Each structure stands twice: as C-alpha cells, then as structure tokens.
Image: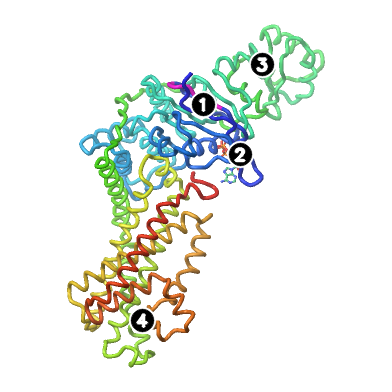
C-alpha cells in the first residue's frame, strides 16, 4: 500500500504540554483524508509538522516518502498548503496577490494571467479581483488564500480548516473544487470542525483528541459502529431519561449533548420510541421533543470525544458550481540555469510586493524620505557650535556630519527593514512562504535588496540636502556613487542582522525591546560623531567590531577627500561584514525557533 502521508509516533511538546502525542495516521494516494477533533486536539500542530513549519519532538512523519525533518525541501516541493491564517497583503489587490504567488510557484509568465483568473473564479473572487485586499471581509480573505493554494496542482493538498468562517455558497464552491481535485488524483488532507463537510468529502477520517487518535475509518463504517439509529430527546429531566434507558436491551448508549439534550443510540428506532414514550408517561418524565435521526459523524465524534465541536453545520442550499479546469502541476526545473531563473522570479515577485506596498503607503514614503534630511538639519544646526573647530579641520561642518547622519539613518533602515517580516511571521504569511518550495534566501534577499535601494535613495537625498545647506564636499560624482555603494552594503548588513533578530524573537515586543536597546550602542560605539582617537580605549576597541565604523570611514573619506587607495581596506571589511551576515542569515530559519511558524 502506498501512503502519501504516514506518521509513526509523531509527537510535539510545548514545554510540559503534549500537543500531539504519538500520532500514527496513514493517508492513501488519491484519497481525501479528514483529521477531526475538538478545539485544541492537535490538528493544526500536526499539520504544521507535516508542512515542515514545526519540528517534531519525537516520532517521524513521511510526506510522499520524504521525511519532514530531514528532507524538508523535497516535502515542500510536493505539497500545497492553505493554513488557517489569513496572510496579509492588505495593500495589494486580489489579482496582484495571486500573481505574486504564481511567480513564487514559477508559473510561466505567458500562463500567469489565465491561471490567476481561473483560481479567482473557482473561489468566486473574480468580480473583486482588482479591489484592494484591505477592503475584504474575513471570508473573502480566506477564499483569497485558498485561490493561492490552488495555483498549482500539488501531489498532496493540505487544507487547515478550509471553509472556516465561509458562507454556504463559498463552502460549496470549495467542496466542489476538492472533489474535482480528488477525481484528478490529488490526495487531500484536511482538518475541519464541520462534520457534514468531513462526511461529504472524506474517504476516510481520523478523530483525534488530546493529540492522540481515538478512532479512524470511513465515515460510513464509523457511523455504523455508533448504532443503527439515534433518538434525539429534549427534556428538563435528563436523569429521569437516563433511568428509563439504563440497562435496557434496546438502548446501546446514552450521550448527553447539552444540558437538556440527550442522544439515545438504539438498535431499532420504532421499538425504542414506543418504550421511551411509554416509560416516560409511567414515571412522569416530561419529554419536550423526541425525534429520530440517522447517525451522523456528529454522533461518532460525540461518542469518541464525549463533546461537540462547537461548530454548527450550515444548512444545505442549492448552488451553481463554477467549473474552470484545474491548474496543471507546474514542472520545477532541475537545471542550474533553470534554478537560477526560478530564484530570480521569486525574488522579483517578492520585491514587487514590497514596492507595491510602499507606493500605496504614501505617507510612509514621504516620511521615510524626509526624516533623514530633517536629521541633518537638526544635527547640523544644533551641534555645529558645540564642536571643537579643530576636530573638523578645514572641512565644513555639514560635510563632517554627513557620514554620521547617513549611518544613523542606516540603523533605522535596518530595524524597519525587519519589521514587515515580523508582521509576516505574526500573521502566518511567512509560514505560507516557508511551506512553498521557494528558496529561503529569496525571501531575505528581496527584503535586503528593497531596503538597500531605499537606504541609497535616502542617502542621496541627505547628500542633496547637505549641498543645499552649504556643504562643499571634496567628493565628485564617482565618489558620490561609491558613497551609495557603501550605504547599500551597510544597510544590507544591518537589515540582515535585524531580520535574524526578528526570526529569533519570541514576540514583536521582544524584537522592539532588543532592537531599541541595540541601536544607540551601535551608533555611539562607532566613529559616527566622535573620532576613534578621541574615544576611551575600550570604546574604540568595541568600535572596531562595528560595521558602522568601517562604513563611516569610507563615506567620510569619500566626502572629505574623495577616493584614495587607503579606503579599499575599510570597504573590504564592510564587504566581509555584509557577506558574513548574509551567510549567517541564510542558515537561520524562522521555522527552527521554539514555536515554529504558523
Ligand atoms: N506555539 C505553541 N505554544 C504552546 N502551546 C501550543 C502552541 N501551539 C499549539 N499549542 C497547544 O497545543 C494544543 C493543540 O493545539 P492545535 O492548534 O494543534 O489544536 P487544533 O486541534 O488545531 O485546535 P482548533 O480546532 O482550535 O484549531 C493546544 O492545547 C494549544 O494550546
């Protein structure tokens, strides 16, 4: 038997708590498999391990024959994943969001528009394709996520609560699509709280509770095991009703489903109905309602977990299914040149996301560009008189200050460069990216490139303001370009460092506390405003390990005297810092941090 998903003794602990406890499930090729369980049963934790976003604490899990811990890249290449989280892309339109995902999946450019239109139609968002996602309701956001998950046809599609919070029509659309994928041979693993959904879609289900499997089988077999029929009784006298059923041959089980509701699992409904009605009359047990129902997965669920799911099933409604053809799998190229092309496409797609967002955040754009220029005005006018004219030698004061202000700005750019990834981590979008077969370095590289370009634009503006304030630097146009190169290296280094901090921080507030704490020492343990010779020995020694020191040495040298061979040394050290940070960051993964990704 070939299984597309197989777990043995799969376990995940969070401190003392075992979220998943020795779970063993098997999903056969081509089937729709449902993972059911009450809130907190461990469904999402299981899925996070299967999608490589969370490392198991014990046991093992194979997806398409690949181990999720040791062969994560192979696993990601074969799965499609739609998480419970709604990835934020609020400043993008729905179409732009899906186009970016298509690029991340390496959908060829010539097919992109058609594919994007198809999946938006499947989830019923075509009419809203050009609206900004910020205007979408929760259900629409969920459908948008699903559209992204449907872009390519994976070997295994993993859906965590795919229809949670959706209206009836949207649920039916998604059911139709899952059924269609199944007909096309795609295996599907889904978690759901809607038992009617599991009943309708799944070939087999596994009910888990407290991280363990309590029962598994086909929905029909599980329902048969519950008993032939179920009498649903509403009464104020539950104890009296129990008294009627206790020890009677016709009563298989008595399950209290609420303070006034009881399900009696019985062999034959008509016999049991007559018995219950007669005995209730004799014993004076008032019955408000008594009805017959065929067993449902609800009953199976209640029987094995002893409680409800807390989610009411919607009523069935007629619907008109939309049926565009499902997307074909996107072949992933294996040649070195193809891989490089893929990287370029991924990085460009993510860069596009950052630039689109910046363009639509007009105020952010204005302040991002204005702020450093204002610093120059403040520092320039307030410190000018406090500085010993001898320290500045024959340079004009603004030119002397310029490198410090540029470095100050680079620290701010480094921190703000990491912040969007922090939000992406928080909202689950980073998890979504990490479950895709895209290179991790593309995520980081796109952010570094974006921030480096922005940092260079800010530095160019600072230089223009400096000229306007009367600075007369020795630097010519070529030196100005070299200044921008140094600024880009410094901004890239600092952004990489702060992204590493964002990956490792357990919360956003921890990130802001540490980055705020680090920013000032970073600035003042450098030659930004005071020459190294004028510092105490220990501070000068610390400053030697600070990339700012080398960047400022290069920039100050260029501004005050223009290029000379001696600047090659600090420039090379700066380059080494940048490469070192990049390599370190390439080895870090947010999925490895304690809690993993959502
Ligand atoms: N990062 C975490 N740190 C600590 N505990 C966690 C973490 N993630 C999950 N848990 C705990 O693990 C248990 C299982 O959580 P999980 O999210 O897997 O449940 P679930 O079955 O998906 O629930 P729901 O139906 O509500 O989505 C819960 O007790 C939860 O509090």
Q: Which residue is mark 4?
A: 379
Instruction: Identify the image quadrant of residue 287.
Output: top right
Q: How is the image coloured?
A: rainbow
SS assignment at label 1:
strand
User: Tags 1 and 2 in contact by the CB under 8 Å rule?
Assistant: no
* Mark 2 sits near ligand 1, with its Cβ under 8 Å away: yes
Foreground: 52 or 251? 52
Q: Which mark is residue 19?
A: 2
Q: Residues within 10 Å of mark 2 (few under 14, many from 20)?
A: many
Q: Nearer the viewer, mark 3 or mark 2?
A: 2
Q: Position of residue 127 (x, y in %)?
A: 30, 36
SS assignment at label 3:
strand
For the residues labelled 4 and 3, the Cα–Cα distance comes to: 81 Å
SS assignment at label 2:
strand
User: Tags 3 and 2 in contact by the CB under 8 Å rule?
Assistant: no
Q: Earlier in the sequence, mark 4 or mark 1?
A: 1
Res 171 seen here: yes
Q: Residues within 10 Å of mark 3 (few under 14, many from 20)?
A: many
Residue 504 in the image: above or below residue 213:
below
Q: Earlier in the sequence, mark 1 or mark 3?
A: 1
Q: Earlier in the sequence, mark 4 or mark 3?
A: 3
User: Tags 1 and 3 in contact by the CB under 8 Å rule?
Assistant: no
Name the side, left or right, on which 48 lies relative to 255. left
Q: What segment is highlighted magenta in the picture?
A: 25-30
Q: Earlier in the sequence, mark 4 or mark 2?
A: 2
Q: Residue at x 26, y 68 (%)?
A: 484
Q: Which mark is residue 231?
A: 3
Q: Position of residue 156 (x, y in %)?
A: 42, 29
For the residues labelled 1 and 3, the Cα–Cα distance comes to: 26 Å
């Amino acid at each position: 038997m070939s299984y597309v998903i197989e777990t043995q003794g799969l376990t995940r602990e969070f401190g003392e708590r075992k979220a998943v406890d020795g779970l063993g499930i098997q999903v056969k090729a081509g089937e729709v498999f449902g993972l059911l369980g009450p809130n907190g049963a461990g469904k999402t934790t299981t899925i996070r391990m299967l999608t490589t976003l969370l490392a198991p604490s014990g046991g093992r899990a194979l997806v398409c024959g690949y181990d999720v811990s040791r062969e994560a890249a192979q696993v990601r290449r074969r799965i499609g994943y739609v998480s419970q989280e709604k990835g934020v892309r609020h400043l993008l339109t729905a179409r732009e969001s899906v186009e970016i995902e298509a690029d991340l999946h390496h959908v060829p450019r010539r097919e992109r528009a058609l594919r994007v239109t198809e999946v938006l139609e499947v989830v019923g968002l075509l009419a809203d394709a050009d609206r900004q996602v910020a205007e979408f309701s929760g259900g629409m956001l969920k459908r948008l996520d699903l559209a992204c998950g449907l872009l390519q046809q994976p070997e295994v599609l993993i859906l965590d609560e795919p229809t949670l919070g959706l209206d009836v029509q949207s649920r039916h659309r998604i059911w139709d699509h899952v059924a269609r994928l199944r007909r096309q041979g795609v295996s599907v693993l889904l978690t759901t709280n809607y038992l009617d959904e599991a009943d309708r879609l799944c070939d087999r289900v596994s009910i888990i509770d407290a991280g363990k499997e309590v029962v598994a089988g086909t929905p029909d077999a599980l329902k048969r095991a519950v008993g032939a029929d179920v009498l649903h009784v509403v009464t104020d006298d539950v104890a009296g009703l129990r008294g009627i059923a206790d020890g009677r041959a016709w009563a298989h089980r008595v399950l209290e489903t609420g303070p006034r509701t009881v399900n009696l699992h019985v062999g034959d409904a008509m016999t049991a109905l007559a018995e219950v009605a007669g005995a209730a009359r004799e014993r004076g047990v008032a019955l408000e309602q008594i009805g017959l129902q065929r067993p449902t997965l609800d009953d199976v669920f209640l029987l094995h977990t002893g409680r409800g799911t807390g989610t009411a099933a919607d009523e069935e409604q007629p619907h008109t299914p939309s049926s565009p053809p499902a997307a074909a799998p996107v072949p992933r190229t294996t040649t070195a040149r193809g891989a490089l092309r893929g990287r370029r496409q991924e990085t460009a797609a993510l860069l596009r996301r950052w630039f689109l967002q910046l363009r639509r955040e007009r105020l952010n754009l204005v302040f991002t560009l204005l702020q450093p220029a204002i610093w120059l005005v403040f520092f320039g006018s307030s410190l000018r008189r406090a500085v010993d004219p001898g320290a500045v030698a024959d340079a004009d004061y603004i030119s002397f200050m310029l490198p410090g202000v540029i470095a100050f700005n680079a620290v701010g750019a480094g921190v703000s460069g990491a912040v969007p990834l922090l939000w992406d981590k928080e909202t689950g979008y980073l998890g979504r990216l990490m479950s895709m077969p895209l290179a991790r370095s593309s995520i980081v590289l796109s952010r570094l490139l974006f921030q480096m370009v922005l940092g260079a634009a800010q530095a160019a503006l600072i230089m223009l303001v400096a000229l306007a304030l009367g600075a007369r630097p020795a630097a010519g146009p070529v030196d100005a370009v070299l200044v921008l190169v140094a600024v880009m290296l410094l901004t890239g280094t600092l952004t990489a460092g702060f992204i590493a901090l964002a990956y490792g921080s357990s919360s956003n507030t921890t990130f802001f506390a540490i980055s705020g704490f680090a920013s000032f020492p970073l600035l003042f343990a450098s030659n930004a405003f005071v020459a190294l010779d004028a510092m105490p020995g220990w501070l000068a020694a610390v400053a030697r390990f600070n990339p700012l020191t080398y960047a400022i040495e290069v920039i100050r040298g260029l501004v005050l005297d223009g290029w000379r061979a001696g600047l090659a040394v600090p420039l090379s050290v700066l380059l080494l810092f940048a490469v070192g940070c990049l390599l370190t960051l390439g080895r870090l993964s947010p999925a490895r941090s304690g809690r993993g990704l959502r």
